[in-house]
Image (cartoon, grey):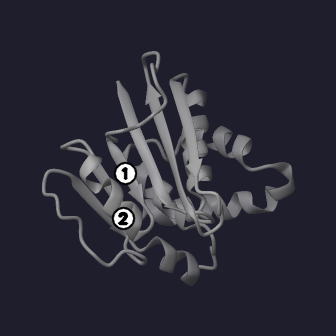
């Protein structure tokens, strides 16, 4: 089984972090993984996207052209990648930043007001983790030892104080 993910938004939203977390989780689960970050020269505020492939088989190329799962955290990303998602795939939309609805009817769409929820709950900067919590809960892998190990790999000792905040954000997302 192979699942291709595309995380897309602007710099500063934690796009690359969310993709890295998913890749590490796949590694901890004994899967083959690929993580390919991409961002514009502006970094914070510029475009950012991240391709992640998690597979039981060897991965031939790290580029995701037709994702099974799209996480769109801003309108330009939804506009750019909506039609690339495979039929039957899933699109996660940060509905606090994207007002328009997905126009396709052959995909599952999850509208999550992640940015506004993060602000309301004192989890500023963790909208990405709210969406990740929802995604992992829908995949049935939120409460896993591999996720905890992946968090430990992705959050440096310097930011250890943010570990529980990330857990809280994912828990909030899982309840939606």
Is the residue marked by circle 1 packed among few (<14), some (14-19), or many (20+) residues within 10 Å?
Answer: many
Residue where numbered disc 2 is placed: 93
Q: Nearer the viewer, residue 1 or 71?
A: 71
Q: What residue sits 60% from the left and 59% below the top?
A: 14
How many numbered badges does the structure rendering display?
2
Q: Secondary structure at mark 2?
A: strand
Q: Residue at x 26, y 59 (%)?
A: 109
Visible in this render: residue 89? yes
- Which label sits on residue 70? 1
Residue 62 drawn above or below residue 123:
above
Figure check: 92 above or below 113: above
Q: Position of residue 33 (x, y in %)?
A: 53, 28
Label 1 to label 2, Cα distance in Å?
Answer: 8 Å
Residue at the extreme bottom: 120
Could you tell me which quadrant the N terminus lies in?
top left
Q: Helix or strand or loop: what does disc 1 sit on?
A: strand
């Amino acid at each position: 089984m192979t699942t291709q993910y595309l995380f897309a938004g602007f710099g500063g939203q934690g796009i690359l972090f969310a993709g890295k977390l998913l890749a590490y989780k796949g590694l901890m689960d004994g899967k083959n993984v690929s993580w390919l970050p991409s961002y514009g020269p502006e970094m914070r505020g510029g475009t950012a996207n991240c391709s992640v492939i998690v597979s039981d088989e060897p991965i031939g190329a790290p580029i995701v052209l037709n994702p099974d799962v799209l996480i769109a955290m801003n309108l330009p990303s939804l506009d750019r990648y909506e039609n690339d998602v495979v039929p039957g795939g899933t699109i996660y939309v940060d509905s606090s930043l994207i007002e328009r609805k997905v126009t396709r009817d052959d995909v599952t769409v999850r509208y999550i007001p992640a940015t506004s929820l993060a602000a309301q709950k004192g989890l500023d900067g963790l909208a990405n983790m709210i969406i990740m919590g929802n995604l992992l809960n829908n995949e049935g892998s939120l409460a896993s030892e591999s996720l905890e190990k992946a968090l430990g790999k992705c959050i440096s000792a310097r930011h250890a104080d943010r570990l529980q905040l990330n857990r809280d954000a994912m828990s909030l997302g899982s309840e939606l």
